[in-house]
Amino acid sequence: MAGDIRAEIEELKKKLSQNPDSLIFVPLADTYRKAGQLEEAVDVCKAGLEKHPSYASARVVLGRIYSEKNMLDEAIEEFKRVESVDVDNIMVHSMLGNVYLKKKMYAEAVEQFQKVLSLNPEDAEIQEKLQDALSAKQSPPAKEEKPAVQAVKQAHEAKKEAAPAPPQAKTDTAKSMKAGELYTKKEEFDKAIDIYKEVLDADPDNIIAQQRLREVYTLQDKKRSKEKEKRSDGKRIDAEKITTEDILDVMKEAVEDDKVEEEAAAKAAEKKKESVPAKAEEKKEEKKELPKEAITAEKAKALEKILKDLGEVDGVVGSFFLTRDGKIVASVLPSTINAAGIEKHIATIVERTEKSVQSMDQGKLNQVVISSESGQLLFTEVLSGVLFMIGNESINVGKMRLILKDVIDNIKKVL
Amino acid sequence: MDFKTLLQKIVESVDGAIGAGVIGEDGIAIDQFSTKSSFDITAAGAEYSTIISSAKKASQSFGLGKTNEVLISTEKATMIMMTIGANYFVTLALSLDGNLGRGRLELKKAIPELEKLL
């Protein structure tokens, strides 16, 4: 084993010397760490970080080395740097939690372990560590054995400093439910959703809260579609209030039509040259730069029709189409999924994946399929937007990809 | 059997496979095997782990539970990633004409063995 590690170190060193600017210094530093050569590990990592200061993985490795060297403050500093740019880095939260535990900073450890569990609730090891941190933090022993969910619940309470007794918790739930009702009546759906989610965080089996949350989502959806209709009606009727976006809409539609009629195309090209010369070429190349307003109400309706048809396919739970900036323009989703609440989040995920693919020099991202325990998620770029499709367990990857082919063609026709 | 042998077996039994690797959630590659010198999973590990973490988040957002597999097709290649436990994943990169079905099957078959090694 020792020989293996030594050989690995030699191989990595050789690679690094052949290409000193490469990122190979990270595995080399980590291998030194595994071999117990912590000084060498620090040196390699620091030297690499001078060339690649924003390389998060290197900071994680350096933090880990510091942690093993018992340089806990330095370790925290490195992990915190990564955390500040990657808030959902599960490994960093876990390592920070461990370092805080070592430093007996239990409240901070609880917070970090809680973050890990919010990203991966099934991590048994972290559940155990959270329990340890909690019991160390709260000196009076509360209960003997608690299931994982309750541990997370306790972490939420611990964060608020005081640990409320169970009867108090009941009154709090009642109050929250009341507040949720009031916000729903006032049509402040986001606040109501937050409250019910909080109740469900503490008590995931609360059927009433589940039911209310579903109702709020439905009401919110209805409100949003009404607003959408109003907006599109307003656009048509109120000619005096034409905005620049509307003008762009009309221009873009005109350009589309012009593609069919050659004469009109010539005129449109001239006009474009006069007003916005640069944009004409961008438009021809790809529609990526189209603003979200380019998808008019009519197009959105047509997209919704396509998504509705898609929803008829056995195994397809829902779908939606969003613009590059994360605005959902058409969606057919069950009431249990609140598209509005996740749109920005989803746009970030798409962007991150695209960036990763590009930095691996793999060209343009075509399609991503995520298979999970209870279903599949597929997203693909279609001209100016991204199509998402959610399937249940009964649909397989192959079928999803096949269905999608036709759907993409239809969406392209609409756009 | 060690990681490299196992990864080599996977790559060699799938048409169009370029390389395979076992990577930790933190982006640190444990081992890799590739048929092309240009394919360096060790360097790409951080990117792969970003993708897996994004996929997990997306999956959670839709209440789909634990992520088992991520399939990415790009202009140049297809990548399959399958999770091994909570902290690791195995990845296989294929050329555009690679046998995707076979690749998924071989990875699935290898997971129990990889779990034992981790």
Image (cartoon, coloured by chain):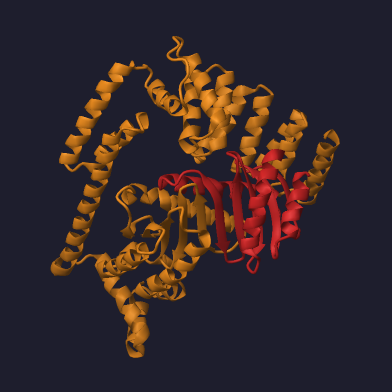
Relative to A366, is A249 on the left or the right?
left
From the viewer's side, name the closer residue of A291 and A266: A291
Q: Which chain is orange?
A: A
The correct choice, above or below, for A130 with respect to A338 in the image is above
Residue B81 x, y percent position in the rendering: 60, 52
Decide which of A209, A41 is in the foreground and name it.
Answer: A209
Identity of the residue furthest to the right in this view: A3
Please state if A98 lies on the left or on the right of A159 as rendered.
right
Front residue of this view, candidates A254 and A397: A397
Q: Which chain is red?
A: B
Query: Does A310 sit left or right of A108 as displayed?
Result: left
In the displayed structure, A248 sits above or below A201; it is below
* Rendered residue at 56%/51% (across/down): B69
- Please tell me which residue is depicted at 36% across the width and 29% down the height of the picture: A202
Q: Residue furthest top?
A: A140
Kindly indicate the quadrant of the structure image that contains residue A318.
bottom left
- Which corner quadrant holds the N terminus of chain A? top right
Residue depicted at 73% across the width and 49% down the height: B32
Can see residue A270? no
Q: Please name the residue shown 37% across and 51% down the image.
A: A343
Vertical arrangement, residue A159 with respect to residue A406, above or below: above
Please state which of residues B2 and A312 is positioned toward the viewer in this rendering.
Answer: A312
